[in-house]
């Protein structure tokens, strides 16, 4: 167990705190887009998939790596597109309705 | 600056965009930009990876990588673009599942790759955790998808000894991991993969349709952890940061979601909620208690004489594709100087925030959407509460009936309003399968029929007056 592992563990622990801290303030109406958005972010496994396919030496590794890249691409592309589609609907509204208590609701 | 340093700096940039994106998603104004920023960061990371050296050489199989990516893009874009908004939860489930599958495959491939070098025990452990968690997420998401898509029953699937059997599966996985750690056996790795697959299915089967969104959030978090495990194996800070961010925030989000239903996460996961409550619905009705029903024209008159109307939408509204008509009704009423609010229960629809998305799609102004607590104070002075496609989220049993499975869930108190208009297709109980006392309340008028047809008629009636 070397310094490298310790360095990764440090990153892990700090990321846990950041992850929790960021989410704590999200209003419930944005929970679905948030879930979808974080779903897209773990699509970063595509980078890992590229690395394993790119270093594959045997047929087995090639097949597994190839599948991994397909699945990861589905995750990352699908994730971002769906999230964008959801959030498209939160665009600013034209003020046709009499605006009332905007601030209160927006919080 | 060396090539590797530059690539690592680009990865740092990507990790930063992910943090900013999650932060942006916390505010309606910046959410879309946040998502775009994360997508940019992801693109940078992917492009940078093409220039990375692994095992001392440039990436092999670049053609294969591009081909696999092309396949992924061709399938993902149309699916994500054109699936109906009501089917969003299962879409998230499936995109999450494939991510978990990818993480498991990356871990397996890396295990096969480095096995000959006799990796340290902790490296093997990282691989095995990645395989286990990623695969559970994959098969669990597949079942969640099947439940929401109604390819199988949305009710909890239970059988005798289920908890014990699941415990044995879980224990078996742990034992298998210990054995593989000491033997480095590849055949046993495939056994672990199979066992994890079964475990994911067995874990999700007893969870009822109404609870599946909470489950998806949990599986989303699992995939994040599997990605972080792969990050350890591959020695990638980017994967560790992104995976852990999603893992940690996902678990918190899951807890917030179960809290919104007034239940603990353990209760959601292990109680087979909603499996044995249908019977009571029938006996209650056998009492011969009467309900009051009205025509859309009656409703139109009633609305015209109101000064404050609160619409309580639920998933039924989305199913009937009635969100546009309901917005039209709100506009008509506002023209006549009648105040209109939409009271959004945190778990209305099938995921928290699902209803907001659907109403926003129909151009309902954001300012008209009020959250539960504010809605409950508005309702005290409301003339009419219009319940459209909601049921469990307005069920007073959550407040009064200790024996009810939804007891303790916060609800929107529709019965505070002067009149309650309850739109229903039939007398069938709601998603959770529980009888609703509100239907029998003397203040309540039931309007039977398809929500969209009914609303269209009401709009006409309101205009005519």
Image (tube, coloured by chain):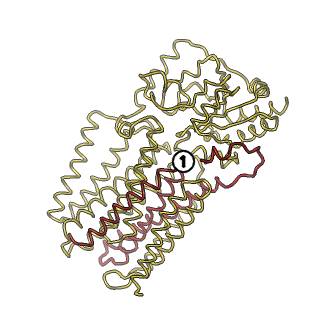
Chain colours: A red, B yellow
Judged from the image, the secondary structure of the residue bearing numbered disc 1 is loop
Q: Position of residue B446 (x, y in %)?
A: 65, 23
Q: Is residue B302 visible?
A: yes
Q: Which residue is disc 1 drawn over? A: A27
Location of residue B293 in the rendering, given as x and y in whole percent from the top left corner:
67, 20
Question: Where is B35 relative to B400, above or below?
Answer: below
Q: Residue at x 55, y 50 (%)?
A: A30
Instruction: Pinpoint the chain carrying mark 1.
Output: A
Query: Callout 1 environment at 10 Å: few (<14), some (14 to 19), or many (20+)?
Result: some
Evaluate whether residue B153 shows in this view. Answer: no
Of residues B199 and A80, the one nearer the viewer is A80
Residue B393 lies in quadrant: top right
Q: Nearer the viewer, residue B259 or B224?
A: B259
Locate residue B60, reporting x and y percent: 38, 81
Query: Residue at 32% across / 71% down in the picture?
Result: B234
Q: Which residue lies furthest to the left in this view?
A: B182
Horizontal and vertical percent for residue B442?
A: 63, 16
């Amino acid at each position: 167990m070397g310094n490298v592992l310790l360095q990764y563990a440090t990153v892990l622990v700090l990321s846990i705190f950041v992850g929790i801290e960021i989410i704590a303030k999200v209003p419930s109406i944005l929970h679905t887009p948030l879930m979808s958005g974080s779903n897209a972010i773990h699509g970063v496994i595509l980078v890992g998939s590229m690395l394993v396919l790119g270093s594959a030496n045997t047929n087995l590794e090639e097949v597994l790596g190839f599948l991994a890249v397909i699945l990861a691409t589905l995750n990352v592309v699908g994730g971002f597109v769906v999230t964008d589609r959801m959030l498209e609907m939160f665009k600013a509204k034209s003020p046709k309705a009499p605006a009332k208590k905007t601030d209160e609701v927006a919080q | 600056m060396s090539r590797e340093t530059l690539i690592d700096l680009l990865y740092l940039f990507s990790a930063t965009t992910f943090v900013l994106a999650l932060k942006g998603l916390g505010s309606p104004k910046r959410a879309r930009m946040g998502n775009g920023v994360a997508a940019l960061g992801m693109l940078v990371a992917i492009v940078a990876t093409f220039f990375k050296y692994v095992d001392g050489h440039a990436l092999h199989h670049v053609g294969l990588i591009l081909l696999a990516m092309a396949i992924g893009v061709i399938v993902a874009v149309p699916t994500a673009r054109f699936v109906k908004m009501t089917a969003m939860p299962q879409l998230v489930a499936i995109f999450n599942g494939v991510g978990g599958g990818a993480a498991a495959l990356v871990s397996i491939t890396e295990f096969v790759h480095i096995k000959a070098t006799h990796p340290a025990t902790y490296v093997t452990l990282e691989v095995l955790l990645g395989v286990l968690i990623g695969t559970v997420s994959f098969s669990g998401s597949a079942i969640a998808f099947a439940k929401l898509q109604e390819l199988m029953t949305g009710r909890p699937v239970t059988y005798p000894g289920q908890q014990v059997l699941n415990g044995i599966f879980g224990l078996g996985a742990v034992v298998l991991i210990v054995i593989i750690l000491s033997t480095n056996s590849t055949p046993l790795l495939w056994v672990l993969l199979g066992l994890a697959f079964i475990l994911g299915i067995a874990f999700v089967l007893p969870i009822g349709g109404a609870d599946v969104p909470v489950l998806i959030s949990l599986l989303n978090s699992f995939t994040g952890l599997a990605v972080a495990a792969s990050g350890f194996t591959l020695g990638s800070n980017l994967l560790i940061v992104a995976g852990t961010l999603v893992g940690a925030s996902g678990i918190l989000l899951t807890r917030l979601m179960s809290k919104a239903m007034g239940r603990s996460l353990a209760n959601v996961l292990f109680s087979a909620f909603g499996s044995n409550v249908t019977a009571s619905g029938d006996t209650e009705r056998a009492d011969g208690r009467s309900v009051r029903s009205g025509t859309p024209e009656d409703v139109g008159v009633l609305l015209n004489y109101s000064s404050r109307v609160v619409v309580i939408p639920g998933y039924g509204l989305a199913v009937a594709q009635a969100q546009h008509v309901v917005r039209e009704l709100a506009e008509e009423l506002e023209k006549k100087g009648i105040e209109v609010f939409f009271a959004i229960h945190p778990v209305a629809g099938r995921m928290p925030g699902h209803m907001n998305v659907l109403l926003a799609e129909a151009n309902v102004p954001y300012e008209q959407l009020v959250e539960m607590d504010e809605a409950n104070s508005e309702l005290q002075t409301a003339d009419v509460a219009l319940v459209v496609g909601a049921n469990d989220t307005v069920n007073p049993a959550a407040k009064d009936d200790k024996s009810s499975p939804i007891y303790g869930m916060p609800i929107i108190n529709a019965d505070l309003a002067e009149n309650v208009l309850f739109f229903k297709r039939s007398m069938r109980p709601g998603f959770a399968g529980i009888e609703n006392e509100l239907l029998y309340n003397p203040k309540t008028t039931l309007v039977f029929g398809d929500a969209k047809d009914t609303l269209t008629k009401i709009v006409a009636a309101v205009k005519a007056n």
